[in-house]
Amino acid sequence: ANVRAAAAAGLKEAGAEGKAATGALIALLGDRDATVRAQAVEALRGMGVAVVDPLKAGTESDSPIQRAAATRVLGGMNAKSAVPRFRELLADDLESVRLEAIVALGALGKDAADAAPDLRPILDEGRHDLRIAAFTALDAIGPEGWDAAKELMALMKAKDARIRAFAAEQLGARGIEESKPHLMASLNDMSHLVRRAAALSLVAIAPADPDVRTLLEAAKDNRLLLSPAVAEEALASMR
């Protein structure tokens, strides 16, 4: 592994001269050793757009590790020409590959507008990390009719607490005032992650609202709702 890692690092330093070894580097993306893979990733990133097509081929590898790594490197190059391949990878059998494809499309922003219909079903259903990544990507792409506030409030109803917590945090960070009733109701959520996110977002949105203070004061006295530390943290922000 040390020899393979050193070879990959050497190709990185070679720059343009190392491009002849692109195929070897892409093969190393599937290496069993994480250090070797990391060196190959860095070497390929340093070669720029000249390796976009070989990387596309790398995303078709039988090795799931290589497919995921090739997708990650390709995504970091912001290559608009790779959008069709990223769209295909949204249906990959491996979740890590699908996640890398979603992130790559989001990084391309409006240049990946054609992928918005493919991302929509992922936002509506699936694992929490994929749904959160799909929201982030769609938000960056900004397809016609996209309403981030509406989508986040819909995510507040997700079964997975991690999605609800993400949505609560985002509503506060974006200062979406119409979300206040949703956040106030979420102080009774079954998950402490959601309750904490809702409390801090309420303070961010309505720092002088007496109704918010009353709710937080009540929550502070009920450990089943908010831990004293979280309640105090939120209330301190209102002072």
Image: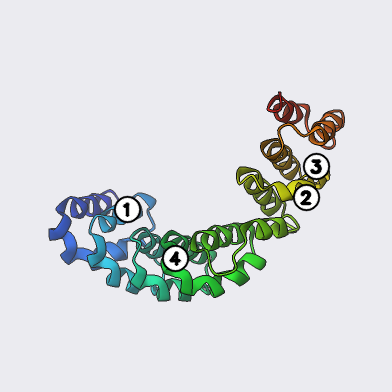
Pointer 4 residue: 110
Q: Position of residue 108 (x, y in %)?
A: 41, 62
* Residue 86 against residue 3 in the figure, above or below: below
Q: Decide if residue 1 is on the left or right side of residue 166.
A: left
Element type at marker 1? helix
Q: Residue at x 79, y 48 (%)?
A: 181
- Point out which mark residue 134 bears: none
Task: Give the residue pinned by disc 2.
Answer: 182
Q: Which mark is residue 36?
A: 1
Characterize the local packing of mark 2: few (<14), some (14-19) or many (20 or more) Cα atoms within 10 angstroms. Answer: some
N-term mark: 1 or 2: 1
Of the residues tagged 4 and 1, which is closer to the observer? 4
Q: Please report contact status of discs 1 and 2: CB closer than 8 Å, yes or no.
A: no
Determine whether 34 is above or below 57 in the image. Answer: above
Q: CA distance from mark 3 to mark 4?
A: 36 Å
Q: Which residue has dot 3 on it?
A: 187
Q: Amino acid at mark 2?
A: His
Q: Amino acid at mark 3?
A: Leu
Q: Give the mark, 3 or 4, whose residue is nearer the N terminus.
A: 4
Q: Mark 4 and mark 1: span between their CA atoms?
A: 34 Å
